[in-house]
Amino acid sequence: MKIIDVGVTAAKGFEAAAAAAGIKYQNRTDMALVYSTVPCKAAGTFTSNIVKAAPVVWDSNVVENSPYVQAVVVNSGIANACTGQQGMDCCKAEAVKAGEVLNIPESAVLVASTGVIGKQIDVEKITAGIELLAAAKAPGAEAGLAAAKAIMTTDTVHKQAAVTVEIGGKTVTVGGMCKGSGMIHPNMCTMLGFVTTDVNISKEMLTKAVKASVADTFNMISVDGDTSTNDTLLVLANGLAGNEEITEEGADFDAFCEALNTINTALAKKMAGDGEGATALFETIVTNAATKEDAKILAKSVICSSLTKAAIFGHDANWGRILCALGYSGAKFDPENVDLYFQSKSGKMQIFGNGVACDYSEEEATKILSDPEVTVLVDMHMGDAQATAWGCDLSYDYVKINADYRS
């Protein structure tokens, strides 16, 4: 597998564009298009929040019922959530306009929105933006980068990744982009994520791969414990790599799953590390748990703990908060048999074991916790299951950003 510095336009046949439609933001791009020159198989996962944005409802129907997909239209600034029938009408207007200017059926158009909940999108602005996107669409890294930047809201950096892998004697490419910084606690996937690939695969097997990957990637991150109304991950496969179609499990399917998982993990970590106000990516690895489910529950409980996140921000080796988070996670274990470690590029040290604090240097612990990527290692000594979760520290700026978000 080879990592390449591209995003959604990395795979054959995919193009992208960005445009400034003035939907909420001024003097910046706020719309993006992802387009395939040929029809695609599509799979998706969506928010588990009962309050679902109009684009989530639209996309769920398209992914489930449309014979193929060929374009995704995205806007930032306004979420088109809690907008009633007017919000659904906006989705349809977007699909109709995209179908017209791209010469594809409206049923082949997916839409996505991110931003403020409760505001209506100006349909004239967004359809005019779609015309701009269609005129600007292009292959190549520059177009993909422009699209990744256009979907940002409170994100401080754009987020994209791509890899190539050999499948059936052909070079297959998987690339993606995402956005997410706040209201991140997926219980299905991410805020907004778009993955493209030229692999030839059946819809059934694509869906199976996506759902399996999400469980160990996007579902294992949290910034603030809030599951968005708009969470959407869309994966499009156009088959242009020319490999024999993947219709069942086996070596080819496993190779694709590994590539997809690599992209989803990279994007998930980029989101966690760019949490609103964050200064550090906070990773928790649980090993030797009794079951995989226990390992996931334990790991996520630690990265979701506000007290632990605040301690990471303060570079404070307050291991009691970690043990506490493990204890209320719901997983059963013996606290006398748990080992805790801190690790970063500055080193690794054990801080807790055999039911008591270890003899460690607070100064050295602070040094480890001061790095931009910090890991807590938890050894449960109960089995052979493991899981990893990603979050970020909790800083003063998180409150500032969200107190002023609508203004």
Image: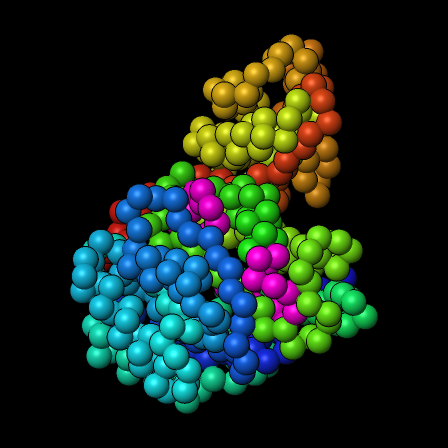
Q: Nearer the viewer, residue 191 or 249?
A: 249
Task: Place residue 9 in its image quadrant.
Answer: bottom right
Tell me where the magenta segment starts and ends, as one range. Answer: 181-206
Tell which residue pokes out farthest to the bottom in this image: 135
Q: Quadrant of the N terminus?
A: bottom right
Number of marks in the rendered image: 0
| Residue 191 counted in the magenta span | yes
Tell which residue pokes out farthest to the right in this image: 169
Relative image position of residue 200 (x, y in whole percent) = 65, 69
Q: Residue at position x 78%, y 67% from top? A: 168
Q: Does residue 283 appear to the left or right of 304 in the view shown? A: right
Q: Does residue 166 appear to the left or right of 290 in the view shown? A: right
Q: Is residue 337 visible?
A: yes
Relative image position of residue 100 (x, y in whole percent) = 34, 86
352 w.r.t. 116: above or below: above
Q: Residue at position x 45%, y 42% from top? A: 187
Q: Is residue 321 visible?
A: no
Relative image position of residue 364 (x, y in whole percent) = 67, 30
10 w.r.t. 303: above or below: below
Q: Name the chief secondary structure element in magenta.
A: loop
| Residue 121 counted in the magenta span | no
Relative image position of residue 216 (x, y in whole percent) = 59, 43
Q: Does residue 126 appear to the left or right of 391 in the view shown? A: left
Task: Place residue 317 in its image quadrant.
Answer: top right
Task: Place residue 156 in its image quadrant.
Answer: bottom left
> Which colour assignment does the render follow?
rainbow
Q: Nearer the viewer, residue 195 or 395?
A: 195
Q: Residue at position x 50%, y 21% from top? A: 330
205 w.r.t. 400: above or below: below
Q: Quadrant of the C terminus?
A: bottom left
Q: Residue at position x 43%, y 56% from top? A: 232
Q: Nearer the viewer, residue 222 or 214?
A: 214
